[in-house]
Protein backbone atom coordinates (compact mmCIF):
# COMPACT_ATOMS: atom_id res chain seq x y z
CA UNK A 1 0.00 0.00 0.00
CA UNK A 2 1.41 3.34 -1.03
CA UNK A 3 1.55 6.18 1.50
CA UNK A 4 -0.73 9.20 1.10
CA UNK A 5 2.33 11.41 0.78
CA UNK A 6 3.75 9.49 -2.17
CA UNK A 7 0.31 9.08 -3.76
CA UNK A 8 -0.10 12.86 -3.58
CA UNK A 9 3.31 13.40 -5.17
CA UNK A 10 2.46 10.99 -8.00
CA UNK A 11 -0.92 12.68 -8.55
CA UNK A 12 0.93 15.99 -8.86
CA UNK A 13 3.42 14.41 -11.23
CA UNK A 14 0.58 13.11 -13.42
CA UNK A 15 -0.55 16.74 -13.75
CA UNK A 16 3.06 17.81 -14.44
CA UNK A 17 3.30 15.31 -17.28
CA UNK A 18 -0.05 16.47 -18.64
CA UNK A 19 1.11 20.07 -18.43
CA UNK A 20 4.27 19.10 -20.33
CA UNK A 21 1.98 17.57 -23.00
CA UNK A 22 0.05 20.85 -23.24
CA UNK A 23 3.28 22.82 -23.40
CA UNK A 24 4.62 20.68 -26.26
CA UNK A 25 1.30 20.92 -28.07
CA UNK A 26 1.53 24.69 -27.81
CA UNK A 27 5.10 24.56 -29.19
CA UNK A 28 3.89 22.30 -31.98
CA UNK A 29 1.20 24.83 -32.90
CA UNK A 30 3.84 27.58 -33.20
CA UNK A 31 5.81 25.49 -35.71
CA UNK A 32 2.69 24.64 -37.74
CA UNK A 33 1.90 28.34 -37.86
CA UNK A 34 5.41 29.01 -39.15
CA UNK A 35 5.21 26.27 -41.80
CA UNK A 36 7.77 24.02 -40.17
CA UNK A 37 5.51 20.99 -40.08
CA UNK A 38 8.35 18.52 -39.46
CA UNK A 39 9.38 20.24 -36.23
CA UNK A 40 5.70 20.61 -35.36
CA UNK A 41 5.44 16.83 -35.78
CA UNK A 42 8.36 16.33 -33.40
CA UNK A 43 6.61 18.32 -30.67
CA UNK A 44 3.27 16.64 -31.38
CA UNK A 45 4.91 13.26 -30.79
CA UNK A 46 6.55 14.70 -27.67
CA UNK A 47 3.06 15.69 -26.47
CA UNK A 48 1.81 12.12 -26.94
CA UNK A 49 4.81 10.78 -25.03
CA UNK A 50 4.03 13.01 -22.08
CA UNK A 51 0.43 11.79 -22.03
CA UNK A 52 1.79 8.25 -22.09
CA UNK A 53 3.99 9.09 -19.07
CA UNK A 54 0.93 10.41 -17.22
CA UNK A 55 -0.99 7.24 -18.10
CA UNK A 56 1.82 5.03 -16.79
CA UNK A 57 1.68 6.85 -13.45
CA UNK A 58 -2.12 6.69 -13.38
CA UNK A 59 -2.05 2.91 -13.85
CA UNK A 60 0.72 2.41 -11.31
CA UNK A 61 -1.08 4.46 -8.67
CA UNK A 62 -4.20 2.41 -9.23
CA UNK A 63 -2.25 -0.87 -9.09
CA UNK A 64 -0.71 -0.02 -5.71
CA UNK A 65 -4.00 1.09 -4.19
CA UNK A 66 -3.31 4.83 -4.14
CA UNK A 67 -6.17 7.28 -4.46
CA UNK A 68 -6.13 8.93 -7.87
CA UNK A 69 -7.03 12.60 -7.70
CA UNK A 70 -7.17 14.24 -11.11
CA UNK A 71 -5.57 17.66 -10.78
CA UNK A 72 -6.06 20.86 -12.79
CA UNK A 73 -3.57 21.42 -15.57
CA UNK A 74 -2.44 24.99 -16.27
CA UNK A 75 -2.46 26.86 -19.55
CA UNK A 76 0.96 26.73 -21.23
CA UNK A 77 2.67 29.74 -22.85
CA UNK A 78 1.81 30.14 -26.52
CA UNK A 79 3.86 33.14 -27.60
CA UNK A 80 7.44 32.47 -28.54
CA UNK A 81 10.11 34.69 -30.10
CA UNK A 82 11.68 32.07 -32.33
CA UNK A 83 12.54 28.39 -32.77
CA UNK A 84 15.67 28.58 -30.60
CA UNK A 85 13.64 29.88 -27.67
CA UNK A 86 11.23 26.97 -28.01
CA UNK A 87 13.93 24.31 -27.99
CA UNK A 88 15.60 26.02 -25.05
CA UNK A 89 12.31 26.10 -23.15
CA UNK A 90 11.74 22.42 -23.94
CA UNK A 91 15.13 21.56 -22.42
CA UNK A 92 14.47 23.79 -19.42
CA UNK A 93 11.13 22.07 -18.88
CA UNK A 94 12.65 18.59 -19.07
CA UNK A 95 15.09 19.61 -16.33
CA UNK A 96 12.15 20.67 -14.15
CA UNK A 97 10.46 17.31 -14.77
CA UNK A 98 13.68 15.46 -13.91
CA UNK A 99 13.91 17.34 -10.64
CA UNK A 100 10.37 16.47 -9.65
CA UNK A 101 10.85 12.78 -10.54
CA UNK A 102 14.01 12.78 -8.41
CA UNK A 103 12.04 14.32 -5.52
CA UNK A 104 9.47 11.53 -5.63
CA UNK A 105 12.26 8.96 -5.89
CA UNK A 106 13.84 10.49 -2.78
CA UNK A 107 10.54 10.26 -0.87
CA UNK A 108 10.06 6.65 -1.97
CA UNK A 109 13.57 5.77 -0.78
CA UNK A 110 12.99 7.48 2.56
CA UNK A 111 9.84 5.41 3.05
CA UNK A 112 11.45 2.19 1.78
CA UNK A 113 8.67 2.07 -0.80
CA UNK A 114 10.50 -0.28 -3.15
CA UNK A 115 7.55 -0.69 -5.52
CA UNK A 116 7.60 3.05 -6.25
CA UNK A 117 11.41 3.10 -6.43
CA UNK A 118 11.33 0.30 -8.98
CA UNK A 119 8.53 1.95 -10.96
CA UNK A 120 10.25 5.35 -11.02
CA UNK A 121 13.53 3.92 -12.27
CA UNK A 122 11.99 3.80 -15.77
CA UNK A 123 11.32 7.55 -15.51
CA UNK A 124 14.82 8.28 -14.22
CA UNK A 125 16.26 6.54 -17.30
CA UNK A 126 13.71 8.23 -19.56
CA UNK A 127 14.70 11.67 -18.27
CA UNK A 128 18.37 11.02 -19.08
CA UNK A 129 17.30 10.36 -22.67
CA UNK A 130 14.83 13.26 -22.77
CA UNK A 131 17.39 15.77 -21.56
CA UNK A 132 20.08 14.43 -23.90
CA UNK A 133 17.74 14.71 -26.90
CA UNK A 134 16.45 18.15 -25.92
CA UNK A 135 20.02 19.40 -25.41
CA UNK A 136 21.12 18.02 -28.77
CA UNK A 137 18.21 19.76 -30.52
CA UNK A 138 19.11 23.09 -28.89
CA UNK A 139 22.56 22.73 -30.44
CA UNK A 140 21.14 21.71 -33.82
CA UNK A 141 18.55 24.48 -34.07
CA UNK A 142 21.26 27.03 -33.26
CA UNK A 143 23.32 25.62 -36.15
CA UNK A 144 20.53 25.77 -38.72
CA UNK A 145 18.06 28.48 -37.72
CA UNK A 146 19.40 31.22 -40.02
CA UNK A 147 20.23 28.95 -42.95
CA UNK A 148 17.03 28.14 -44.92
CA UNK A 149 18.47 25.06 -46.67
CA UNK A 150 19.77 23.58 -43.43
CA UNK A 151 16.53 24.45 -41.63
CA UNK A 152 14.56 22.71 -44.38
CA UNK A 153 16.63 19.53 -43.91
CA UNK A 154 16.27 19.72 -40.13
CA UNK A 155 12.52 20.05 -40.55
CA UNK A 156 12.53 17.01 -42.85
CA UNK A 157 14.51 15.04 -40.26
CA UNK A 158 12.05 15.78 -37.48
CA UNK A 159 9.11 14.94 -39.74
CA UNK A 160 10.29 11.31 -39.51
CA UNK A 161 9.59 10.99 -35.81
CA UNK A 162 6.72 8.66 -34.96
CA UNK A 163 5.02 7.98 -31.66
CA UNK A 164 5.73 4.48 -30.35
CA UNK A 165 2.97 3.41 -27.97
CA UNK A 166 3.95 1.88 -24.66
CA UNK A 167 3.59 -1.91 -25.11
CA UNK A 168 2.70 -2.24 -21.41
CA UNK A 169 -0.09 0.38 -21.54
CA UNK A 170 -3.47 -0.82 -20.28
CA UNK A 171 -5.24 1.43 -22.77
CA UNK A 172 -3.55 1.65 -26.18
FE1 LIG B 1 7.62 13.02 -19.13
FE2 LIG B 1 9.47 14.71 -21.00
O1 LIG B 1 9.16 13.99 -19.37
Image (cartoon, helix red, strand yellow):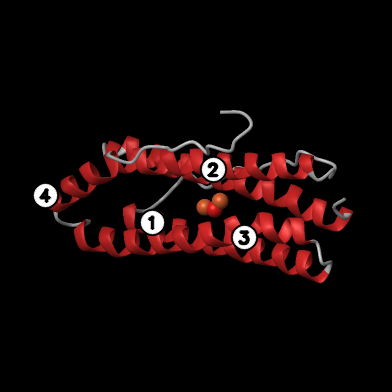
Q: Residues within 10 Å of mark 2 (few under 14, many from 20)?
A: many
Give left or right: position of 66 versus 153: right
Of badges 2 and 3, nearer the viewer stands 3
- Disc 4 marks which residue? 149
Seen from this angle, which residue lies furthest left? 149
Q: Nearer the viewer, residue 93 or 79?
A: 93
Determine which residue is flagged by label 1: 87
Q: Find the distance from the CA under tag 2 to the CA under tag 3.
A: 21 Å
Q: Is residue 71 left or right of residue 24?
A: right
**Is residue 150 shown above or below 98?**
above
Q: Secondary structure at mark 1?
A: helix
In terms of depth relative to the viewer, which is nearer, 164 or 23?
164
Q: Residue at x 75, y 42 (%)?
A: 71
Asked if 81 appears above or below 71 in the picture, the reply is below
Residue at the extreme top of the image, as rendered: 172
Percent coordinates x, y for residue 139 in the rendering:
29, 65
Mark 1 and mark 3 lie on one chain; the one further toward the N terminus is 1
Residue wearing tag 2:
21
Cα–Cα gap, marks 3 and 4: 41 Å
Residue bearing the label numbered 3: 121
Q: Residues within 10 Å of mark 1 (few under 14, many from 20)?
A: many
Q: Quadrant for residue 73, please give it.
A: top right
Disc with the residue nearer the chain's start (3 vs 4): 3
Q: Residue at x 76, y 61 (%)?
A: 114
Q: Earlier in the sequence, mark 2 or mark 3?
A: 2
> Label 2, label 4: how many angstroms apart (C-alpha)?
30 Å
Amino acid sequence: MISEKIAKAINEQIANEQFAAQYYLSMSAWFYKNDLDGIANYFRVQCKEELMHADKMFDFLNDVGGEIVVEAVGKPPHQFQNAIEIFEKALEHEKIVTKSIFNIMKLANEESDFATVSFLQWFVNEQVEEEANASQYVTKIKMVHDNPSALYLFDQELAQRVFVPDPTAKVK
